[in-house]
Amino acid sequence: GEGAVDPQCGGAFVSAEQRNAYEYQTETILSTIGLNIYDGAIRTVALAKRGHFGPVDAYMRDTLLAHSTKEFENIRAGRPCRGVVSRGECVDSEGACGFCYGDGTTNAAKTLSFEDAYFFRMIADYHSVEQVVDARCPDRGQTWKWNEYRPVLGENA
Protein backbone atom coordinates (compact mmCIF):
# COMPACT_ATOMS: atom_id res chain seq x y z
CA GLY A 1 0.00 0.00 0.00
CA GLU A 2 0.91 3.61 -0.34
CA GLY A 3 1.38 6.17 2.37
CA ALA A 4 -1.01 8.99 3.16
CA VAL A 5 -1.41 12.15 5.19
CA ASP A 6 -2.51 11.21 8.71
CA PRO A 7 -4.40 13.70 10.93
CA GLN A 8 -3.27 11.78 14.03
CA CYS A 9 0.30 12.77 13.09
CA GLY A 10 -0.45 16.47 12.78
CA GLY A 11 -1.23 16.14 9.07
CA ALA A 12 2.20 14.65 8.29
CA PHE A 13 2.74 12.09 5.55
CA VAL A 14 2.88 8.53 6.91
CA SER A 15 4.62 5.95 4.72
CA ALA A 16 3.24 2.47 4.09
CA GLU A 17 6.08 1.08 6.22
CA GLN A 18 5.15 3.37 9.13
CA ARG A 19 1.47 2.42 8.78
CA ASN A 20 2.41 -1.29 8.82
CA ALA A 21 4.61 -0.75 11.88
CA TYR A 22 1.71 1.01 13.61
CA GLU A 23 -0.72 -1.81 12.77
CA TYR A 24 1.72 -4.37 14.18
CA GLN A 25 2.35 -2.19 17.24
CA THR A 26 -1.40 -1.81 17.81
CA GLU A 27 -2.17 -5.53 17.53
CA THR A 28 0.69 -6.32 19.91
CA ILE A 29 -0.47 -3.80 22.51
CA LEU A 30 -4.17 -4.67 22.21
CA SER A 31 -3.46 -8.37 22.67
CA THR A 32 -1.12 -7.64 25.61
CA ILE A 33 -3.12 -5.16 27.72
CA GLY A 34 -6.61 -5.59 26.24
CA LEU A 35 -9.39 -8.07 26.82
CA ASN A 36 -11.69 -9.24 24.06
CA ILE A 37 -15.04 -9.27 25.88
CA TYR A 38 -16.05 -12.54 24.18
CA ASP A 39 -12.94 -14.16 25.66
CA GLY A 40 -13.80 -12.57 29.00
CA ALA A 41 -17.30 -14.03 28.82
CA ILE A 42 -15.97 -17.51 28.08
CA ARG A 43 -13.53 -17.19 31.00
CA THR A 44 -16.32 -16.18 33.40
CA VAL A 45 -18.38 -19.23 32.37
CA ALA A 46 -15.39 -21.51 32.95
CA LEU A 47 -14.69 -19.94 36.35
CA ALA A 48 -18.35 -20.17 37.40
CA LYS A 49 -18.55 -23.82 36.36
CA ARG A 50 -15.56 -24.52 38.63
CA GLY A 51 -17.23 -22.67 41.53
CA HIS A 52 -14.95 -19.59 41.43
CA PHE A 53 -17.68 -16.97 41.72
CA GLY A 54 -15.62 -14.18 43.32
CA PRO A 55 -13.73 -13.14 40.16
CA VAL A 56 -16.90 -13.51 38.07
CA ASP A 57 -18.88 -11.27 40.43
CA ALA A 58 -16.06 -8.70 40.53
CA TYR A 59 -15.78 -8.59 36.71
CA MET A 60 -19.54 -8.24 36.29
CA ARG A 61 -19.95 -5.64 39.06
CA ASP A 62 -16.76 -3.59 38.68
CA THR A 63 -16.40 -3.64 34.90
CA LEU A 64 -19.46 -4.63 32.87
CA LEU A 65 -22.23 -3.28 35.10
CA ALA A 66 -20.14 -0.21 36.03
CA HIS A 67 -19.50 0.33 32.28
CA SER A 68 -15.92 1.35 33.06
CA THR A 69 -12.33 0.29 33.69
CA LYS A 70 -9.43 1.99 35.46
CA GLU A 71 -8.82 4.69 32.79
CA PHE A 72 -11.95 4.36 30.64
CA GLU A 73 -15.05 6.01 32.04
CA ASN A 74 -17.25 4.28 29.47
CA ILE A 75 -16.85 0.91 27.74
CA ARG A 76 -20.12 1.18 25.81
CA ALA A 77 -20.67 2.72 22.39
CA GLY A 78 -23.41 5.12 23.42
CA ARG A 79 -22.15 8.47 22.12
CA PRO A 80 -24.93 10.05 19.98
CA CYS A 81 -24.73 9.57 16.21
CA ARG A 82 -23.60 12.73 14.41
CA GLY A 83 -23.54 11.19 10.92
CA VAL A 84 -22.27 8.05 9.22
CA VAL A 85 -18.58 8.37 8.37
CA SER A 86 -18.68 5.88 5.46
CA ARG A 87 -21.41 7.96 3.80
CA GLY A 88 -19.45 11.19 4.18
CA GLU A 89 -21.99 12.61 6.65
CA CYS A 90 -19.34 13.23 9.31
CA VAL A 91 -15.55 13.46 9.51
CA ASP A 92 -14.42 11.54 12.58
CA SER A 93 -11.86 13.16 14.81
CA GLU A 94 -11.33 11.40 18.13
CA GLY A 95 -14.86 9.94 18.16
CA ALA A 96 -16.66 13.15 17.12
CA CYS A 97 -19.14 11.25 14.96
CA GLY A 98 -20.39 9.04 17.77
CA PHE A 99 -21.93 5.63 17.08
CA CYS A 100 -24.67 5.06 14.52
CA TYR A 101 -26.90 1.99 14.66
CA GLY A 102 -29.31 0.79 11.97
CA ASP A 103 -30.77 2.58 8.99
CA GLY A 104 -32.81 5.31 10.67
CA THR A 105 -33.63 8.39 8.63
CA THR A 106 -32.23 10.80 11.25
CA ASN A 107 -29.15 10.73 13.46
CA ALA A 108 -31.42 10.53 16.51
CA ALA A 109 -33.07 7.42 15.07
CA LYS A 110 -29.61 5.85 14.67
CA THR A 111 -28.64 6.58 18.29
CA LEU A 112 -29.20 3.98 21.03
CA SER A 113 -29.76 4.85 24.66
CA PHE A 114 -26.78 4.26 26.91
CA GLU A 115 -28.44 1.17 28.39
CA ASP A 116 -28.99 -0.31 24.92
CA ALA A 117 -25.61 0.67 23.43
CA TYR A 118 -23.25 -2.17 22.56
CA PHE A 119 -20.10 -2.88 24.53
CA PHE A 120 -16.77 -2.29 22.82
CA ARG A 121 -15.18 -5.45 21.44
CA MET A 122 -11.97 -4.87 23.37
CA ILE A 123 -11.56 -3.26 26.78
CA ALA A 124 -8.53 -2.43 28.91
CA ASP A 125 -7.56 -0.68 32.09
CA TYR A 126 -5.15 1.67 30.32
CA HIS A 127 -5.63 4.27 27.57
CA SER A 128 -1.93 4.46 26.68
CA VAL A 129 1.37 2.84 27.55
CA GLU A 130 4.09 5.11 28.93
CA GLN A 131 7.19 5.44 26.75
CA VAL A 132 5.59 3.66 23.77
CA VAL A 133 5.84 6.06 20.83
CA ASP A 134 3.20 5.95 18.08
CA ALA A 135 4.92 4.13 15.18
CA ARG A 136 3.07 6.17 12.53
CA CYS A 137 5.00 9.32 13.36
CA PRO A 138 7.91 8.49 15.66
CA ASP A 139 9.59 11.86 15.06
CA ARG A 140 6.72 13.58 16.92
CA GLY A 141 7.34 11.48 20.03
CA GLN A 142 3.63 11.16 20.76
CA THR A 143 2.48 8.29 22.92
CA TRP A 144 0.53 5.43 21.36
CA LYS A 145 -3.14 5.63 22.41
CA TRP A 146 -5.90 3.05 22.61
CA ASN A 147 -7.72 2.92 19.29
CA GLU A 148 -10.10 -0.04 19.46
CA TYR A 149 -13.62 1.34 19.61
CA ARG A 150 -15.64 -1.18 17.61
CA PRO A 151 -18.96 -2.05 19.26
CA VAL A 152 -20.09 -5.68 19.06
CA LEU A 153 -23.19 -7.79 19.57
CA GLY A 154 -24.15 -11.44 19.36
CA GLU A 155 -21.61 -14.21 18.99
CA ASN A 156 -18.81 -11.64 19.10
CA ALA A 157 -19.83 -10.50 22.54
Image (spheres, rainbow, N blue to C red):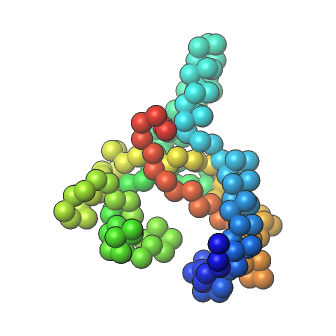
Q: Can you tell which quarter of the image residue 135 is in?
A: bottom right
Q: Is residue 149 above or below residue 9?
A: above
Q: Position of residue 88 (x, y in %)?
A: 36, 75
Whether residue 31 is visible to the viewer of this picture, yes or no, is yes
Picture quarter with the N terminus: bottom right
Q: Residue furthest right?
A: 131
Tell me how many marks there are: 0
Residue 130 lies, in percent from the top left, at 77, 64
* Of the pair 66 and 147, the residue shown nearer to us: 147
Across and down, in percent, residue 22 comes to: 71, 66
> Looking at the image, is 96 positioned above or below residue 140?
above
| Image vertical order of residue 117 relative to residue 1, above or below | above
* Residue 18, picture quadrant: bottom right
The residue depicted at 32 percent of the width and 74 percent of the height is 89
Q: Residue furthest left?
A: 105
Q: Quadrant of residue 9?
A: bottom right
Q: Is 41 positioned to the left or the right of 85 in the image?
A: right
Single out the residue that lies furthest toward the front. Answer: 1
Q: Nearer the viewer, residue 20 or 38?
A: 20
Q: Position of residue 91 (x, y in %)?
A: 42, 76
Residue 72 lies left or right of residue 20; in this view the side is left
Which residue appears at 59% of the width and 34% of the height? 40
Give the residue displayed 20% in from the left and 64% down from the top: 106
| Residue 134 visible (yes or no) | no
* Residue plotted at (46% across, 34% down): 155
Q: Is residue 153 above or below residue 48?
A: below
